Structure formats: C-alpha cells, structure tokens
C-alpha cells in the first residue's frame, strides 16, 4: 500500500506533488513562497542517489515532506498513478522546472492580451490566488481535472478559463471523480503520453477538464536533461502516439514534428488532439474508445 502523507491539512489547501529525477536545480521550488512550500511533497525514486538528493532538497527548501516511490515506480506515469492512489482528496502535480507567469493586460486594439510577465520569485499573493482558483474549480459540477495555461496559449484567449483543452506542466485532479470515471494513468498501453490518455478517459466518462488562463507556466524544452527525458525516447513517443491514435480514432491524430532544441533536434512523433470534439462526442455518447 502507498505510504500516506500526513492527514493534518486543510481541505482548502490541497497538497502539491512535485516528482523530480536527476536534477539538482529545482526551478519550481525556487519560485514558491514559504507558505506554499509547506504544502509541497517532493517525490523521488528509490535509488540511493535520488533519495539523498531528495533529502537535501527538502532540507534546503523546507518543503512539507519527501515521498520515496517503491522500486516498481520507474516511470512518470507510474508516479502519477501512485500519487492518485494515496487518498481521495484533490491534489496538484507540478513539473520541477517551471517558471510562473501572469497574463498581460488586454491590448489597446482589443484583440488578445500582452505577452505574459514572469512572476517574481516568492510572490505569495500570486501563488495563493492561483492555487485557490485551481482548487475552486473542483467545487464546480463535473470538473475532475484542472490546470494552468501555458505561456504560448494564455495571451491568445479572452476567457479566464478554457474547458476541454490540452493540459501540461501543472495539473490538478479530484481522485473521487477520477475513480468514478474508472480512469488510470497506467494500464495495458504505452506510458509516454499517459496524461493525455487520462484526460480523454475523463472526458469519455462525462467529466469536465478546465484550464485557467489568468495564470500560466513555462519550462525548458521537452527532453531537457533530467526528469522524464531519462527514459522518454523518440521511439517511446512514437509508440504512444500511434497507440493513442488507434485508441481514440475520432479525436487523435499522430503527426511528425520537426524539433530544434527538444530531444536533441530531429523529427519526433507527437499527437494532435481535438479536445472540443472529444467533449462534444462524449456528450452525445458517441466517443469511441477502441482499446481499454
């Protein structure tokens, strides 16, 4: 059974899990104020080096707790599933290499917004407001998943939130609703893009996934040293993309993308997901899932 983190916490302040692997610098933690660090659970695998690195990071930043995964948790999808199994309270997951931003002011032309501005480190008001708004979405009917917009997207939309769009970098889940959907990160499928498969499972079950646009995040390019890049290869991405396309044929298309910095450059296989179409088909009970 997973080791449970201390239950002494306010339901209005969900825990923040930050899985990390092979990275000495913790950019996400550097941004967070003390009041938020006290809600963070740093997650590491069971290698001796990683446990020692984790203990040092916990001591340096004063985070709430250190969670050491069992040896069987050797992939980020398995880490997410392990966290999901811990309890029934909503929680957040963040990548370990993020900068946080606030959407700029509306342009004078009225079309779109100015580019997001990086939030200063330890900006307590920003982070408390951001986390409170993320948590508030779980009280809304049918919302099982929440998150933040990414820098390239948030300034292009005029709404404060967007339902049924791509989630990445910062996630929030309500495990009770996830359980009702029967959704899992880990199963008889490739693991490289399990977050997309999780989101599609939730939509298929009739739940809402909501992304906030007032706040956003940005990170180093895909495949940056450390983290999931230690095992997320071009071949693994291709396998998962093709599997997702076969599993959700109405809404997922595998595509070839030319990358520059990501994964050392070259062509990689990604997916294009029609999130809004998936939601429409789910409402009509016409969304097909080929493989379980």
Image: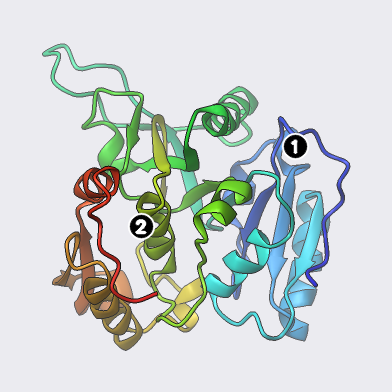
Q: Is residue 6 left or right of residue 63?
A: right
Q: Earlier in the sequence, mark 1 or mark 2?
A: 1
Residue 239, label in figure:
none
Determine the residue positioned at 31% across, 43% down: 164
Q: Say whether residue 131 is left or right of residue 40.
A: left
Q: Position of residue 129 (x, y in %)?
A: 58, 24
Confirm whether residue 27 shows in the render.
Answer: no
> How would you rate the neighbour count of disc 2 (Cα within 10 Å): few for under 14, some for 14-19, many for 20 or more?
many
Q: What residue lies at 37% left-to-right and 50% top-to-bottom?
A: 203
Q: Please indicate, yes or no, whether residue 275 appears anywhere in the rendered image.
A: yes
User: How many numbered markers are drawn?
Assistant: 2
Q: Which residue is mark 2?
A: 200
Q: Residue at x 27, y 50 (%)?
A: 285
Q: Position of residue 210 (x, y in %)?
A: 40, 38
Which of pointers 1 and 2 indicates the residue nearer the eye? 2
Q: Are marks 1 and 2 in contact (CB under 8 Å)?
A: no
Can you identify the residue that label 1 sits on? 34
Q: Is residue 174 left or right of residue 9?
A: left
Res 242 → quadrant: bottom left
- Is 76 located above or below residue 275 in the figure? below
What x and y, as percent, mark residue 65?
81, 56
Query: In the image, residue 53 lies at what x, y percent?
Result: 74, 72
Quarter of the C terminus within the rendering: bottom left
Q: Residue at 44% across / 61% down in the picture? A: 198
Q: Give the colour scheme shown.
A: rainbow
Cα gap from disc 1 to disc 2, whole angstroms: 35 Å
**Element type where label 1 sits in the image:** helix
């Amino acid at each position: 059974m997973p080791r449970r983190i201390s239950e002494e916490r306010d339901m209005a302040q969900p825990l923040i899990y930050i899985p990390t692997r092979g990275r000495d610098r913790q950019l996400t933690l550097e941004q967070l104020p003390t009041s938020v660090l006290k809600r963070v659970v740093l997650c590491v695998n069971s290698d001796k080096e990683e446990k020692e690195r984790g203990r040092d990071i916990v001591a340096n930043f004063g985070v709430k707790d250190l969670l050491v995964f069992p040896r069987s948790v050797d992939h980020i999808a398995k880490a997410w599933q392990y966290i999901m199994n811990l309890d029934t309270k909503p929680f957040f997951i963040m990548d370990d290499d993020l900068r946080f931003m606030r959407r700029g002011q509306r342009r004078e032309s009225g079309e779109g917004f100015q580019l997001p501005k990086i939030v200063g480190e330890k900006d307590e008001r920003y982070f408390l407001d951001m986390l409170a708004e993320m948590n508030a979405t779980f009280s809304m009917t049918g919302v099982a998943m929440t998150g933040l917009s990414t820098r390239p997207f948030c300034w292009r939309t005029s709404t404060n939130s967007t339902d049924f769009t791509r989630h990445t970098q910062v996630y929030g889940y309500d495990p009770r609703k996830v359980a009702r959907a029967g959704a899992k990160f880990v199963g008889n499928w490739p693991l490289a893009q399990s977050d997309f498969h999780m989101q599609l499972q939730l939509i298929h079950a009739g739940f809402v996934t909501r992304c906030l646009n007032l706040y956003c995040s940005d990170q180093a390019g895909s495949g940056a040293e450390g983290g999931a890049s230690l095992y997320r290869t071009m071949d693994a991405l291709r396998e998962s993309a093709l599997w997702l396309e076969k599993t959700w044929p109405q809404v997922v298309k595998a595509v070839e993308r030319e990358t520059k910095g990501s994964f050392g450059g070259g062509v990689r296989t990604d997916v294009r997901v029609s999130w809004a179409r998936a939601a429409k088909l789910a409402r009509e009970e016409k969304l097909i899932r080929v493989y379980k």
